Image (cartoon, grey):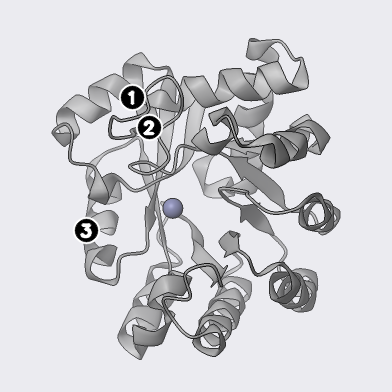
């Protein structure tokens, strides 16, 4: 059994949702977390989770959209935090690679939503790219108050950042990136991450894993990521899947 911990069902176009749900089932995936970050799609994501038993959701302002975030979106996140299927606040964080929003606006939105997660006693889903130093400083401030911690998703950073977030009690989410040829750095991070701290995700429709490059990614490709993690760690695939499954329930306790 597998749990897809990070995808964007509201962005998938290759198949109708019913077909995607069938393919998910056939891939042995029993629960799916769809990440609500598009400010225009926060309601749609909530609706998906309210309609389908296997779908859970999050709400957050992505660092890309930090500059446009208004109190309306923050209030949505705040009021929905008590929804039985809203498993986390996210994805939130810093992206200094694209800097679609000015860094200062990104930091403010990140901190505001971390506080919101503290108040709601929810874990967080963190996106961080080319912003290790500020990410570590901000996590350090909030981590003592954040009882449920969370995950650094789509991990692409350094060993140092990995070791830091692990020491702070966070999980690390790996996706199709680890199947890419030029991903030695992230593959090294897979090797150093203890099996009890690994989450599996596709981040679909982005980052399609090998051997399906060129197609739209979907949660149903999660088994390829599980297999790659097992190979990198020299673990039996079923043992790895069991770890990842239990980690998902521990990280996002509303999934249990
Ligand atoms: Zn994502």
Label 2: element kind? helix
- Tell me what residue is drawn at x 37 percent, y 44 percent: 206
Q: Quadrant of residue 54?
A: top left
Q: Is residue 48 left or right of residue 218?
A: left
Residue named by callout 2:
219
Q: Look at the picture and state if 228 lies above or below 129.
A: above
Q: Residue at x 33, y 42 (%)?
A: 205
Please give left or right for residue 193 compared with residue 53 in the image. Answer: right
C-alpha distance separating marks 1 and 3: 20 Å
Residue drawn 62% across and 38% down?
Answer: 199
Q: Which mark is residue 214?
A: none
Residue 40: where, in percent of width, then height?
22, 69
The response on whether ligand 1 sits within 8 Å of label 1 is: no
**Label 3 beta carbon less than 8 Å to ligand 1:** no
Residue at which label 3 appears:
44
**Label 2 Cα crowd, 10 Å radius (few <14 / some 14-19 / many 20+):** many
Asked if the residue at tag 1 contacts the one at tag 2, i.e. Cβ–Cβ closer than 8 Å, the answer is yes
Instruction: Report which residue position mark 1 lands on.
Output: 24
Q: Does residue 164 lie above or below 97 as drawn?
A: above
Q: Position of residue 22 (x, y in %)?
A: 24, 21
Disc tally is 3
- Report how far apart the C-alphas of labels 2 and 3 lie in the structure: 18 Å
Q: Nearer the viewer, mark 2 or mark 3?
A: 2
Please indicate, yes or no, whether residue 61 appears anywhere in the rendered image.
no
Q: CA distance from mark 2 to mark 1?
A: 6 Å
Instruction: Give whichever of 105, 84 is nearer the camera.
Output: 105
Asked which quadrant contains residue 256, the reply is: top right
Dot 2 or dot 1, earlier in sequence: 1
Q: Is residue 4 above or below residue 243?
A: below
């Amino acid at each position: 059994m597998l749990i897809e911990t990070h995808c964007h069902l509201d962005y998938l176009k290759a198949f109708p949702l019913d077909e995607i749900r069938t393919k998910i089932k056939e891939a042995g995936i029993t629960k799916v977390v769809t990440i609500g970050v598009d400010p225009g799609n926060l309601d749609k994501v909530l609706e998906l989770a309210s309609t389908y038993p296997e779908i859970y959701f999050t709400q957050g302002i992505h660092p890309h959209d930090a500059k446009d975030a208004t109190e309306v979106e923050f209030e949505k996140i705040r009021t929905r935090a008590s929804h039985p299927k809203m498993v986390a606040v996210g994805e939130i964080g810093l992206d200094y690679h694209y800097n679609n929003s000015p860094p200062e606006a990104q930091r403010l939105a990140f901190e505001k939503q971390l506080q919101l997660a503290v108040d709601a006693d929810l874990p967080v889903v963190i996106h961080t790219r080319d912003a290790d130093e500020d990410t570590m400083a901000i996590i350090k401030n909030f981590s003592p108050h954040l009882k449920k911690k969370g995950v650094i998703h789509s991990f692409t950073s350094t060993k140092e950042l990995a070791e830091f977030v692990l020491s702070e009690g966070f999980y690390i989410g790996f996706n199709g990136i680890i199947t890419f040829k030029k991903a030695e750095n992230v593959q090294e991070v897979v090797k150093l991450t203890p099996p009890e701290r690994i989450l599996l995700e596709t981040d679909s429709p982005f980052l399609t894993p090998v051997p399906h490059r060129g197609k739209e990614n979907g949660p149903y490709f999660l088994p390829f990521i599980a297999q790659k993690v097992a190979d990198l760690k020299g673990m039996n695939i079923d043992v790895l899947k069991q770890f990842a499954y239990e980690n998902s329930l521990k990280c996002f306790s509303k999934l249990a």
